[in-house]
């Protein structure tokens, strides 16, 4: 049984796992198009010697050790005369609001090269061999005239006859506290740079636009299915898709966008990334988070979000750091509550481990990115979380579908159980009405006889042993009245709920015997009890009682002036119950069909044994015809024992 269940589970998850492996392979193949390892060109005193470089086959990383001139916007003309040219100040690079970067590249004469990287943060004016090539934003000595902007740039270079290229970058930064620096720079032939950029742009668009489409899908699912897990996934996909500055700034925004608004949105997006990870944990395990925690976190994030559009732009990075600091204790608190939840409430299953693994991967990536932001250009502009978010999203989508399938299966089981219970209740009502009315008749006789004896006693004309007989009659009347009251309550929908709980085995046997002894006596049958198990069962008392009643009724129909034995015994993890009679037995041709609905050899409806079997299986037990023949039949069923926790 367990082996079949494991195979069924394996088949259920085999296809999703194969699809995930295929998607992962495609993503890794696309990621392989983005070159990450380069030969290095190291400048010395503001000059990089690339005459020995193999540009035909390689893309080179130019180390950003350029000459720096803080505080002044120099032009190439200022460097024309080596005697009067300004001297670089490599020691004072911090806090400069404006300045100049300069690099000389030595390469083979008459060679076409291409250099590409992000512009210097906030505004950049570029000169190549004395000519102005680009002005990203507007660089100026006057803060009121300067216009900030950041773009990804590509510079065509030609070495000419001298084989020398002079690069002069002016920058102005009146809006931000961070230092300006030359971004990660690559240099090669136009063909190699084109291939490099194609891979970079393809991967950037694939991941970020894919995350945006996933966001739309998850938000639609959240609106239709009313599941907060989908909403949290949509939020994560949005903030991490916009985290890629090339995708957001180069492909989503128009050319003349407002830099200040874009910058505030970008910093806000980075600030929301840890909050989105917390939202995943809180929505997938709401019981572990708690409403108070969610309200506190939500209130803090709303305040910080509003501050992103209020504080001066120089304070935005500090505000972003505060967001990370605010989220850190919430993350630790959620981890503690989650561990406590799994320790006290339930053990984690396969879906839980998959969920925790996916969210853990995302959190580790976010922590690594947070520690390297500001010191790594690739982290600053592209981030390392988009690929992790795609993997996390796919895994959590599998988790949500698994949860939905589990809920659907439970719903189907509940529907089947309700249908079976409806059939049981219908049969119970018919049977119990008959039994109740049959028991009411002897009760009326007993009560009348007791009243007659009372009158005789009052007249001081008691028959012999009248007092003893009166006591016996009254005791029997009280006992039968209690049985009838319980049966009538059950008949008219006043029974207890059908939840499974601890059931006393001896109480079950005594209850069945109390109800069925008068019925057995009508056909002069003796009902015997043999109790071999005195513990607790895991089941429903009323349903199990009805199984025994139905089996005894069947035995009574085929037995007259005989013995019907009701027996319990220990059977390992189960308790076994049997109803044995000394009647005519079951016909051989009927044996294979006795548990089929609608099959009957008498005037009944053919539902009794079928419902008994379904009821026992509902309790995870089995019902069988143990033996039959001319000397009688024996029906046996098992019920699991109650496990002490």
Image (cartoon, grey):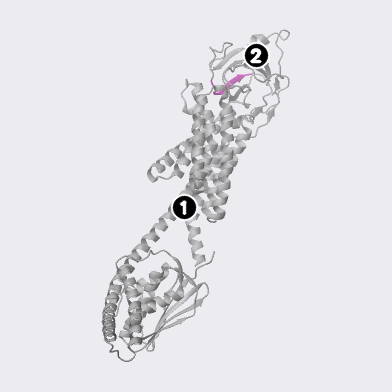
| Range shown magenta | 149-158
User: Residue 309: in sight, yes or no?
Assistant: yes
Looking at the image, which residue is at 65% across and 32% down?
38
Residue 437: give x, y in percent of width and height.
26, 76
How far apart marks 2 and 1 lie (CA) works out to 61 Å
The quadrant of the picture occupied by the C terminus is: bottom right
Q: Residues within 10 Å of mark 1 (few under 14, many from 20)?
A: some
Placement of 109 over or under 576, stated as above or below? above
Closer to the camera in the image, 577 or 350:
577
Quarter where residue 98 is shown: top right
Q: Position of residue 142 (x, y in %)?
A: 57, 11
Q: Tag count in the figure? A: 2
At numbered mark 1, what does the secondary structure look like: helix, strand or loop? helix
Q: Which residue is nearer to you in this view: 394 or 361?
A: 361
Q: Sort mark 2 into few (<14), some (14-19) or many (20+) by Cα contacts within 10 Å.
A: some
Q: Is residue 342 magenta?
A: no
How far from the left and from the top, in percent, is residue 641?
49, 70
Residue 529 position by quadrant: bottom left
Q: Going by the picture, which residue comes out furthest to the bottom?
A: 464
Q: Earlier in the sequence, mark 2 or mark 1?
A: 2
Element type where label 2 sits in the image: loop
Q: Position of residue 458 (x, y in %)?
A: 28, 84
Determine which residue is flagged by label 2: 71
Numbered label attached to residue 402: 1
Q: Nearer the viewer, residue 57 or 325?
A: 325
């Amino acid at each position: 049984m367990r082996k079949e269940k494991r195979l069924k589970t394996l088949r259920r998850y085999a296809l999703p796992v194969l699809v995930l492996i295929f998607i992962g392979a495609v993503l890794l193949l696309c990621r392989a198009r983005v070159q990450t390892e380069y030969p290095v060109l190291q400048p010395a005193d503001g000059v990089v010697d690339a005459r020995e470089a193999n540009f035909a086959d390689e893309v080179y990383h130019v180390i950003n050790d350029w000459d720096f001139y803080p505080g002044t916007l120099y032009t190439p003309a200022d460097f024309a005369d080596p005697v009067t040219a300004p001297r670089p100040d490599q020691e004072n690079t911090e806090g400069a609001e404006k300045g100049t970067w300069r690099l000389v590249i030595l390469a083979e004469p008459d060679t076409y090269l291409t250099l590409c990287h992000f512009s210097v943060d906030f505004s950049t004016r570029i000169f190549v061999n004395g000519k102005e090539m680009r002005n990203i934003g507007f660089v100026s000595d006057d803060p009121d005239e300067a216009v900030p902007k950041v773009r990804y740039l590509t510079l065509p270079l030609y070495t000419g006859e001298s084989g020398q290229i002079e690069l002069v970058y002016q920058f102005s930064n009146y809006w931000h506290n961070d230092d300006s620096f030359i971004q990660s720079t690559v240099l090669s032939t136009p063909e190699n740079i084109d291939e490099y950029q194609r891979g970079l742009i393809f991967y950037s668009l694939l991941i970020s636009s894919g995350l945006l489409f996933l966001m739309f899908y998850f938000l639609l699912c959240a609106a239709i299915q009313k599941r907060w897990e989908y909403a949290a996934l949509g939020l994560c996909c949005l903030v991490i898709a916009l985290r890629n500055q090339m995708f957001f700034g180069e492909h989503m925004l128009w050319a003349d966008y407002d830099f200040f608004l874009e910058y505030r949105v970008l910093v806000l997006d980075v600030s929301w990334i840890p909050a989105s990870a917390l939202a995943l944990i809180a929505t997938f395990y709401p019981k572990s988070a708690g409403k108070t925690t969610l309200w506190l976190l939500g209130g803090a994030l709303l305040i910080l979000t509003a501050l992103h559009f209020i504080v001066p732009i120089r304070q935005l990075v500090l505000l972003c750091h505060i967001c990370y600091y605010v989220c850190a204790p919430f993350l630790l608190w959620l981890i503690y509550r989650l561990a406590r939840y799994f320790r006290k409430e339930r053990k984690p299953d396969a879906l839980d481990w998959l969920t925790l693994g996916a969210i853990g991967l995302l959190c580790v990536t976010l922590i690594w990115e947070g520690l390297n932001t500001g010191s790594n250009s690739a982290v600053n502009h592209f981030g390392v979380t988009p690929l992790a978010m795609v993997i996390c999203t796919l895994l959590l989508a599998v988790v949500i579908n698994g949860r939905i399938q589990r809920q659907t299966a439970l719903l189907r089981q509940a529907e089947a159980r309700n249908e079976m219970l409806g059939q049981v209740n219908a049969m119970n009502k018919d049977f119990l009405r008959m039994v109740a009315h049959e028991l009411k008749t002897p009760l009326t006789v007993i009560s009348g006889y007791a009243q007659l004896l009372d009158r005789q006693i009052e007249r001081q004309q008691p028959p012999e042993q009248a007092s003893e007989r009166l006591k016996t009659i009254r005791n029997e009347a009280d006992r039968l009245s209690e049985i009838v009251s319980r049966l009538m309550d059950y008949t008219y929908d006043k029974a207890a709920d059908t939840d499974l709980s601890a059931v006393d085995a001896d109480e079950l046997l005594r209850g069945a015997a109390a109800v069925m002894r008068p019925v057995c006596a009508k056909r002069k049958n003796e009902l015997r009890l043999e109790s071999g198990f005195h513990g607790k069962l895991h089941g429903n008392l009323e349903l199990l009682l009805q199984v025994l009643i139905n089996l005894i009724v069947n035995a009574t129909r085929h037995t007259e002036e005989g013995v019907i034995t009701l027996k319990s015994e220990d059977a390992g993890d189960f308790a076994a119950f049997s109803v044995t009679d000394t009647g005519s037995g079951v016909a051989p041709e009927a044996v294979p069909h006795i548990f089929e609905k609608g099959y009957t050899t008498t005037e009944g409806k053919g539902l009794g044994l079928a419902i008994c079997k379904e009821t026992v299986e509902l309790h995870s037990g089995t019902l069988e015809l143990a033996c039959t023949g001319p000397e009688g039949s024996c029906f046996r069923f098992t019920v699991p024992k109650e496990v002490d926790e």
